[in-house]
Image (tube, rainbow, N blue to C red):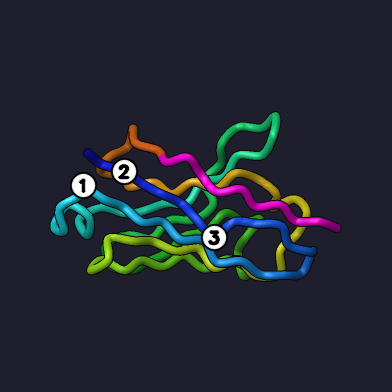
């Protein structure tokens, strides 16, 4: 069974940093590294939005709102992905989810990030 488990969220003051982790299970290695991975977030009352993507060659893309502050990475051997978040702002407050594009309908529980002003 494919599972994605996010962790690393918490309460931080504006300007602070957090590193989110996404550990997967039930995915064979060739499938894991054969697809891009994403981080999404959903704030209360808002739609889920794409924050960052890393493809199979390590090429990354970011939403304009986080560009220059967030860094997505992946460790294929560990079947994991990460999101380093720096210079956090109150508007970054949301539930953060990782996503594997091959298993597009699978989502974890998310990890809550709360940034106080």
Answer with left or right where residue 60 lies relative to residue 112. left
Image coords of residue 48 (percent x, y): 56, 36
Q: Earlier in the sequence, mark 2 or mark 3?
A: 2
Mark 2 and mark 1 residues within 8 Å of each other at the beta carbon: yes
Q: Which secondary structure lies at badge 1?
A: loop
Q: Circle 1: is it few (<14), some (14-19), or many (20+) Cα within 10 Å?
A: few
Instruction: Let me know if residue 113 is in the magenta part.
Output: yes
Image coords of residue 83 (percent x, y): 50, 63
Q: Distance between the residues labelled 2 and 1?
A: 6 Å
Q: How far apart are marks 3 and 1 (CA)?
A: 21 Å
Q: Circle 3: is it few (<14), some (14-19), or many (20+) Cα within 10 Å?
A: some
Instruction: Tell me which residue sits at (54%, 52%) in the image.
Output: 51
For the record, the magenta segment spans 108-117
Image coords of residue 26 (percent x, y): 21, 47
Instruction: Tell me which residue sits at (51%, 44%) in the image.
Output: 110
Which quadrant of the figure has residue 90? Answer: bottom right
Q: Name the residue under label 3.
A: 8
Image coords of residue 52 (percent x, y): 49, 56
Which quadrant of the figure has residue 57? Answer: bottom left
Q: Which secondary structure lies at badge 3?
A: loop
Q: In this view, does 43 lie above or below 55?
A: above
Total numbered labels placed on residues in the image? 3
Looking at the image, which is closer to me, 63 or 42?
42
Q: Mark 1 points at which residue?
A: 26
Looking at the image, which is closer to me, 92 or 112?
112
Q: Name the residue under label 2.
A: 3
Looking at the image, which is closer to me, 51 or 81?
81
């Amino acid at each position: 069974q494919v599972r994605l488990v996010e962790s690393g969220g918490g309460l931080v003051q504006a300007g602070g940093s957090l590193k989110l982790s996404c550990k997967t299970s039930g995915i064979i290695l060739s499938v894991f590294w054969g697809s891009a991975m994403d981080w999404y977030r959903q704030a209360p009352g808002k739609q889920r939005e794409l924050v960052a993507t890393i493809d199979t060659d390590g090429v990354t893309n970011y939403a304009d709102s986080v560009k220059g502050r967030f860094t997505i990475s992946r460790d294929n051997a560990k079947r994991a992905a990460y999101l380093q978040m720096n210079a956090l702002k109150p508007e970054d407050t949301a539930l953060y989810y990782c996503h594997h594009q091959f298993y597009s309908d699978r989502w974890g529980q998310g990890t809550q990030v709360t940034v106080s002003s």
